[in-house]
Amino acid sequence: MSNLRILPKIRDNISFLYFEHCRIEQEAKGIAIFQEKDKYSIPCTNIATLMLGPGTSITHAAIANLAKAACTVQWVGAEAMRFYSCGQGSSNNTERLHHQVKIWTEPQQRLEVVRRMYKFRFGE
């Protein structure tokens, strides 16, 4: 890849959070997660992916906060064993996505990426 600036910056983010059987609401610039008697306040900008398991309800305002922060929201099964759907807010930079789709549609380029990934991971 010639331009590394198009890669996402995840240095200080929590890579993912998984919650089930809870209620999620908007709270200032973040979200509040209510689970039984506990409440967790999380800034949206600190999450890369929020995984919602069974029994989870989320407000429209909370989804809007997550979308503004370009956080991916995934609806998954119990213990994240099944994947049902996902949504991602606009990060105003779809260049990465277009680049990935372009490579994926070309079998020769896709194979070259696989070879480079294996070489990077295994050194062979």
Image (cartoon, rainbow, N blue to C red):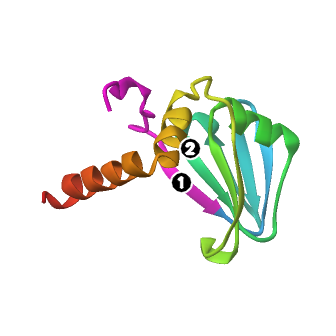
Helix, strand or loop under label 2: strand
Numbered range of the magenta stretch: 1-18
Between 28 and 51, which is closer to the camera in this rendering? 51
Distance Cα–Cα, label 2 vs label 1: 6 Å
What kind of residue is marked 2?
Ile
Between 103 and 51, which is closer to the camera in this rendering? 103
Q: Is residue 55 above or below residue 91?
A: below
Local packing at callout 2 (Cα closer than 10 Å; few below 14, some 14-19, many 20+) is many
Q: Percent position (x, y) of residue 81?
A: 61, 76
Quarter occupied by residue 84: bottom right
Is 48 on the left-hand or right-hand side of 73? Answer: left
Instruction: Return the residue at label 2.
Output: 47
What kind of residue is marked 1?
Phe
Q: Residue at position x 42%, y 38% from top? A: 12
Q: Residue at position x 77%, y 71% from top? A: 54
Q: Percent position (x, y) of residue 117?
A: 29, 53
Quarter occupied by residue 55: bottom right
Quarter occupied by residue 124: bottom left
N-terminal of the pair, mark 2 or mark 1, is 1
Q: Quadrant of the N terminus?
A: top left
Q: Is residue 9 magenta?
A: yes
Instruction: Return the residue at label 1.
Output: 16
Q: Cβ–Cβ below 8 Å for labels 2 and 1?
A: yes
Q: Is residue 109 magenta?
A: no
